[in-house]
Image: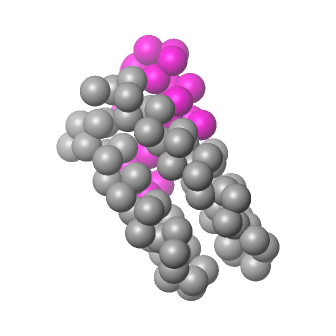
Amino acid sequence: MTDSEKATAIIDALKAAEHEPAQVALPILNGLVGLVQAHGEQPLEVEEARSSAFMAICEIGKALHRGQPADALWAPAIGATERWQSLVR
């Protein structure tokens, strides 16, 4: 799977998980970890975008795990993943 395909899958999963309760969304987010990990060396801009997407997804996971509101975290995570996707196309 290419990085572009991974980013597309992550965006789709984030959009699907966004409207689910925490007990459904958390396993979806946990399943994204392998997709957002780096595999091989990429230009710095791509690595920074990938890392930003990963961190944004982790922030959602932390909030959901702690029972905190996560509504404002979804859009930044999707946006960060879309930025990564735009760089790997």
Q: Would residue 56 be visible to someone looking at this image?
A: yes
Q: Is residue 53 left or right of residue 85?
A: right
Residue at x-position 51% and y-position 79%: 20
Figure quadrant of the N terminus? top left
Q: How is the image coloured?
A: one colour
Find residue 14 and report its horizontal and vertical position in percent.
Answer: 46, 60
Q: Is residue 77 above or below residue 72?
A: above
Figure quadrant of the C terminus? top left
Q: Is residue 27 left or right of residue 60?
A: left
Find residue 65 and report its horizontal and vertical position in percent.
Answer: 69, 74
The part of the image, by quadrant, that contains residue 73 is bottom right
Residue at x-position 51% and y-position 16%: 44
Q: Is residue 44 above or below residue 17?
A: above
Specify start and end residues of the magenta stretch as a single range.
Answer: 31-52
Q: Is residue 2 above or below residue 31?
A: above
Q: Is residue 30 above or below residue 88?
A: below
Find residue 81 and report its horizontal and vertical position in percent.
Answer: 47, 42
